[in-house]
């Protein structure tokens, strides 16, 4: 059973989400501050982090950045409002997805399960594109012989795009295939996911060789 780390300063919200997620079959460890959350993360190495952004002391944005310095564990952030600044800043800090408060446990459970599924690849062998090598059996990605550490979402995005080089995927198609979200999904998840992926696999992210923009529509892989 995957273990979740829930970092939420409101005791009632934290306890309510813990109980609800446990009823959905998750093992949940709670933390009330960013500092406690980081210490718990280092001690327990959970499979996924649910992170409130508005924490006392070290806020959720900084917690996310610090986790990303050492780990590619999936992170779902909780934001008290669908504020564009909060969402974009959180995604740029390294979060994989977000849920707006007040949180519906069934929605959060669905997002958790979707994010965890992204860590599972398909067995096809090796895809080699220029200096980029994608081993879909071991889920190891390397560029010019150096292994690259990707989050499950970034890996799934790369797998989907590289499966059909030259094909243009709309943001909506990527939301459905990578984030498992329908027409109500947020296209900023795609744009920020692409941006983060490019910083890891492209020699020059501003002039991408592998993940290219189809202006006004979406993204394509290659040609290289």
Image (cartoon, rainbow, N blue to C red):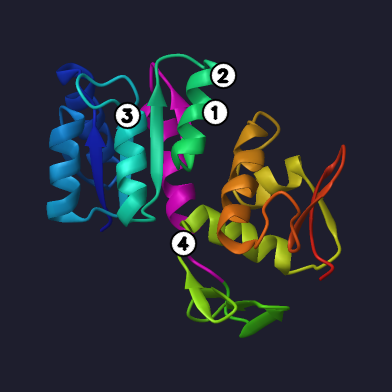
Give the image location of residue 101, x and y in percent.
40, 18
Task: Give the residue number, with chain letter if any, for mark 4.
Answer: 119
Picture residue at 65% right of the left edge, 62% below the top: 203
Does residue 208 appear to the left or right of 166 in the view shown?
A: left
Task: Give the residue number, with chain letter if any, for mark 2.
Answer: 84
Label pair 1/2, CB-CB below 8 angstroms: yes
Picture residue at 61% right of the left edge, 51% below the top: 178
Would you call the spot at circle 2 few (<14 residues within 10 Å), some (14-19), or many (20 or more)? few
- First in sequence: mark 4 vs mark 2: 2
What label sits on residue 60 in the rendered view? 3
- First in sequence: mark 3 vs mark 4: 3
Would you call the spot at circle 1 few (<14 residues within 10 Å), some (14-19), or many (20 or more)? some
Which SS class for mark 2? helix
Does residue 216 appear to the left or right of 140 in the view shown?
A: right
Label pair 4/1, CB-CB below 8 angstroms: no
Q: Is residue 175 above or below residue 208?
A: above
Cα–Cα gap, marks 3 and 4: 23 Å
Which SS class for mark 3? helix
What label sits on residue 88 in the rendered view? 1
Q: Which residues are magenta?
A: 98-121
């Amino acid at each position: 059973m995957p273990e979740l780390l829930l970092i939420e300063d409101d005791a009632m919200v934290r306890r309510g989400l813990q109980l609800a997620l446990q009823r959905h079959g998750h093992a949940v460890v709670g933390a009330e501050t960013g500092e406690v959350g980081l210490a718990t993360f280092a001690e327990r190495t959970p499979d996924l982090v649910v992170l409130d952004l508005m924490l006392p002391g070290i806020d959720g944005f900084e917690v996310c950045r610090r986790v990303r310095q050492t780990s590619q564990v999936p992170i779902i952030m909780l934001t008290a409002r669908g504020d564009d600044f909060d969402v974009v800043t959180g995604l740029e800090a390294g979060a994989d997805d977000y849920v707006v408060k007040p949180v519906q446990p069934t929605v959060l459970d669905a997002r958790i399960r979707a994010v965890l599924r992204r860590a599972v690849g398909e067995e096809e062998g090796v895809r080699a594109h220029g200096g980029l090598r994608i081993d879909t059996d071991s889920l190891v990605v390397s560029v010019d012989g150096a292994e690259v550490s990707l989050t499950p979402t970034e890996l799934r995005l790369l797998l989907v795009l590289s499966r059909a080089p030259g094909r243009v995927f709309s943001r909506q198609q990527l939301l459905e295939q990578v984030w498992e979200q329908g027409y109500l999904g947020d296209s900023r998840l795609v744009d920020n996911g692409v941006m983060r992926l490019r910083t890891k696999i492209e020699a020059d992210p501003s002039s991408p060789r592998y993940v290219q923009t189809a202006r006004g529509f979406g993204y394509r892989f290659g040609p290289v």
